[in-house]
Amino acid sequence: MPQSNVKQWDATTPVSLDGPSDYELKLTDDLGKTLIEYDLFETANESSKRSQVLKKLDEVAKEFVYKVSRLQGMPEEEAKGAGVKIFTFGSYQLGVHGADADIDTLCVFPQHVTRDHFFTIMYDMLNHIPEVSELTAVAEAYVPVIKMHFEGIPIDFVCARLCLPSIPKDLDLSDNQLLIGMDEKCIRSVNGARVTNEILRLVPSVPTFREALRAIKLWAKQRSIYSNIMGFLGGVAWAMLVAKVCQMYPKTCASVIVARFFHIMADWKWPQPVFLKPMEEGSVPTRQWNPDVYPADRAHRMPIITPVFPSMCATHNVTDSTKKIMMNEFLRASQIVDDIMSGVRPWRDLFQPIDFFCMYNHYLQITASSKSHKTQLQWAGLIESKIRQLVLQLELLEPLELAHSFMHGIEKVHYCLSNEEQWYIAHGHSIDGRSFPMDNTLTRKDYVRKMKLTIEQERSMTPLYTTTFYVGLKFKSVKDSPTNNRKLDLVWPKREFLKMAKVWDKFNPDTMGIALRHIKSSTLPSELKGALKQEYIKVSHCMILQMHPYNT
C-alpha cells in the first residue's frame, strides 16, 4: 500500500496498517490467559513491596551522597542539597517483569562523588543493612554493578557520576548534554535507563508491546536462549526486536506481533543491523557503533543497535554457535505459530521448555567451587562471565559444529568429611545424602537434620559450595568434516579457560577451585535427565584439569 502519508516510526516504515480481526483478538485473549498460567505477573502485594524497597534504596542513596559530601568537607546544608536520583530500567521499567525478576536500578550522583565511593562506602552501608543479603560487588565488570537481595528482591545496582555540582529532582536523562565529561563506564550505566525509556517512546502501542514482549521473553527463557552473558540475547535486545516488529505492524494486536516476530527474525538477513531509529550525532566525543570504521563492529553477527546516543550494539556477545542455535529456534517457533494462528495448536506448545540434557551425546562440565557461600557468589559469577570465551575457543575445534552453553548454573552445597571428598566434589560429583540444591532459606542446622551423621562427623564436616555449568557439544557429520577428524582434543581450550580464571585478582587457590570435564550424556547427573538411576562417574576415566586445593 502507498506509504507517503503514513507515520514512520523513526527508522521503520510500517509493513501494514491493518488492524486486528476478531479472530486475532481472540487469539490475543488466549495468549494473555496462557501467560497468566505461567505465573508471569506479580500480585498487588508484591508490586507494593517492590515500591517500598525502592523507596528504602532511595533513602540509602541520599544518606550515601550526604556522607561522601561531608567527608569531603562540604557544609551540612550544602551536603543535604547535593542530591541523588534513583532510576529503574530493564524489565521493571518496561513493565514486563515477573514476580521473581530483579530490578535494574541506576544511582545518579553529582561530580564530587565517584565510582570508587559507590563501591566502597555505598557497599559498606548496604552490608550493614539487615534486610540486604547476597551482597556482591563487580566493580571491574563492563557495566560495574552491585548485586544484592533487598528484603528478598534481587537488585542490580549501577551508578553514574554526572558533571553537575548537584542533582536536580526533575533530572531528565534524555538530555545528551548530561553525557559531557562522563567516562565510558558511566555512559554505559546511564544508557541502560536511557535506552529503556526510548524504547517505550518508540513503540506505537505500549500495551501491545508489553504483552508481546512477555510472550517472547517466556519463549526465550523456556528455550534457554535468554542470556547475554552466555552469548545469546539479553532483555534489552529481545525488547528492541519486539519493538521493531511493533513498528512494522503498528495497528495490530499482540498475537499477530508474536506470530510475525518469528517469521521476520527467521528471515532476517544478518548481519544487517536492527535499528529502531536513525543513529544520532552527539556533541560528546565518544565512540558509537560504526562497522565502516571499527573492525570489531564489522564482526558482530547479529547487530541490534540501541536507540540513544551513543548508539551501541546490544548483541556483541553473539557467537557463531549461539547465532545458529537462535536461528534454528526462530525457524522452529515460526512453524508452531503458524499452527497456532490456524487454530491447530494452543499457545502453550510455543512455550515448551527445551530438553537441553537430552539434546547432545557429549557435554563439557565446568564446576566452580568455594569454601564459603559469599566467595562462591563472586567466583561463580566470574566463571559464568568467561564461558562465552570458552565457547569461542571450542568453535575453533575441527570436529565441532557448535558449542551450546546452558544458561543456568546449577548451585549446590555439599557437606564433606574428608579432603578426598572435597576433591571429588570439586570435580563435578555429588555425595549421596550430603549434597543438596542450594537453598538460601535453609541454615546449617536444617541441612544437618537431613543427614544421618554421628556427633563426630557433624563436628568435622566442612561445607563446599559448587556452581556447575554445562556446554553441549555437537559434532559435525562425517560429510561436513573435511579432514574426517572425529577426535576432540580439549586440552588447549581447557588450559586457556583455566588461565583466564586464574588471573582474576581475587582468586585464592586455598579456598577456590575450578575443574572441567568432558562427559557423555549417559554420565550426566541423574537429576538433570530426570532419570532414577544413581549418578556414578569413575574419576579415573574423566579428562580433568584443575587448579584448586582439594588434591591429596
Image (cartoon, rainbow, N blue to C red):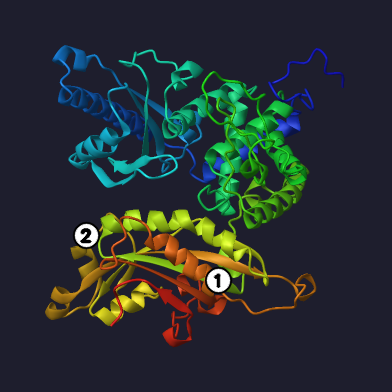
Residue 429 pos. (x, y %): 39, 75
Q: Going from the N terminus, do you reach mark 2 or mark 1 first?
A: 1
The three-letter code of the residue at mark 2 reads Thr
To which residue does mark 2 refer? 443
Marker disc for residue 483: none
- 548 or 241, nearer to the observer: 548
Q: Can residue 432 be seen by looking at this rendering?
A: no
Few, some or many residues within 10 Å of mark 1 (<14, 14–19, 20+): many
Helix, strand or loop status at disc 2 = loop
- Relative to 379, say whether 184 is above or below: above
Quarter holding the N terminus is: top right
Residue 267 pos. (x, y %): 78, 44
- 179 or 415, nearer to the observer: 179
Quarter holding the C terminus is: bottom left
Left or right: 123 as drawn, with respect to 409: left
Q: Residue at x 32, y 55 (%)?
A: 505
Q: Splitting the image into 4 quarters, where does residue 467 fall?
A: bottom left
- Relative to 171, say whether 29 is above or below: below
Whole-number angstrom distance, CA of label 2 to CA of label 1: 33 Å
The three-letter code of the residue at mark 1 reads Tyr
Few, some or many residues within 10 Å of mark 2 (<14, 14–19, 20+): few
Marker disc for residue 363: 1
